[in-house]
Image (cartoon, helix red, strand yellow):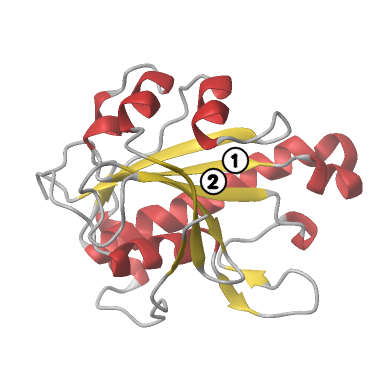
């Protein structure tokens, strides 16, 4: 298994939170230029990265009901999509701030088909995919678990939106997809529910 240690994320940037909120848009057209590994690092940290350690799970960039953190984050990279990173499907590990390659190769076309042929999925340099292991939340919150998990995925996705704006990148959230096809691409079991796909690239228009 190939392990990619990501650059350390920064906590001070050139754009204020207010500016990022004001500028935030769903951007579906991309130039085709690659992302940098520094940008990928920052996006994944914004999505689910650690902001403070603690004894059990650490505190992350997005809030989680009961601190149970049911979300898992994946990166699907197309050929020449990220400088210094080969095409493939990767799993993000927040505690080590690294990527583990799950499968080698360009799966952008597979992901596009799984997302009902939405062309911006394949046009993006990379896609962040969130899944959820709902049982992690259900053990404490029972029938409320699904609602809490979906709320949490929204928190994480908005973080990616704002971080993308701060980096001068474009992204959009995708909610229409075939769950089993996403699971097959990510090589995950049935207890991981795909909840969001986020294409990311350099915007063709600002």
Identify which residue is drawn at 23% across, 57% down. 35
Give residue 18's quadrant in the image: bottom left
Q: Where is residue 98 in the image (x, y as percent from the top left)?
A: 50, 66
- Classify mark 2: residues with Cα within 10 Å, few (<14), some (14-19) or many (20+): some
Give residue 115's quadrant in the image: top left
Identify which residue is drawn at 26% across, 62% down. 84
Q: Are marks 2 and 1 in contact (CB under 8 Å)?
A: no
- Classify mark 1: residues with Cα within 10 Å, few (<14), some (14-19) or many (20+): many
Quickly name the residue at label 1.
Answer: 131
Q: Nearer the viewer, residue 44 or 160?
A: 44
Label 2 or label 1, whichever lies nearer to me, is 1
Task: Indicate left or right for 61 with 64 as reference.
Answer: left
Disc assigned to residue 143: none
Task: Indicate left or right for 174 with 19 as reference.
Answer: right
- Above or below: residue 39 compared with residue 196: below
Identify which residue is drawn at 9% across, 45% down. 205
Q: Position of residue 65 (x, y in %)?
A: 75, 55
Q: Which of 197 and 153 is in front in this view?
A: 197
> Which element is circle 1 on?
strand
How many callouts does the rendering have? 2
> Which element is circle 2 on?
helix
Q: Residue furthest front?
A: 1
Quickly name the residue at label 2.
Answer: 154
Q: Position of residue 107 (x, y in %)?
A: 36, 33
Instruction: Compute the Cα span from label 2 to label 1.
Output: 12 Å
Identify which residue is drawn at 85% across, 42% down. 138
The earlier-in-sequence mark between 2 and 1 is 1
- Above or below: residue 194 compared with residue 181: below
- Above or below: residue 165 compared with residue 179: below
Q: Where is residue 102 in the image (x, y as percent from the top left)?
A: 51, 46
- Above or below: residue 158 compared with residue 182: below
């Amino acid at each position: 298994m190939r392990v990619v240690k990501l650059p350390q994320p920064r906590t001070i940037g050139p754009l204020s939170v207010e500016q990022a909120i004001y500028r935030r848009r769903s951007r579906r057209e991309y130039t085709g230029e690659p992302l940098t590994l520094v940008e990928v690092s920052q996006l994944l940290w914004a999505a689910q990265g650690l902001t403070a350690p603690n004894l059990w799970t650490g505190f992350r960039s997005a809030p989680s009901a009961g601190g149970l953190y049911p979300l898992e984050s994946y990166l699907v990279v197309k050929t020449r999509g990220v400088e210094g990173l080969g095409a493939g499907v990767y799993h993000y590990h927040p505690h080590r701030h690294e990527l583990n390659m799950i499968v080698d190769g360009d799966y952008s076309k597979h992901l596009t088909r799984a997302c009902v042929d939405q062309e911006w999925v394949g046009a993006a340099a990379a896609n962040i995919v969130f899944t959820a292991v709902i049982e992690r939340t259900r053990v404490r919150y029972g029938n409320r678990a699904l609602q809490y998990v979906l709320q949490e995925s929204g928190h994480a996705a908005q973080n990616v939106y704002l971080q993308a704006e701060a980096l001068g990148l474009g992204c959009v959230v995708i909610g229409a997809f075939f769950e089993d096809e996403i699971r097959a691409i990510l090589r995950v079991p049935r207890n991981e529910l795909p909840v969001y796909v986020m294409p990311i690239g350099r915007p063709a228009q600002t």
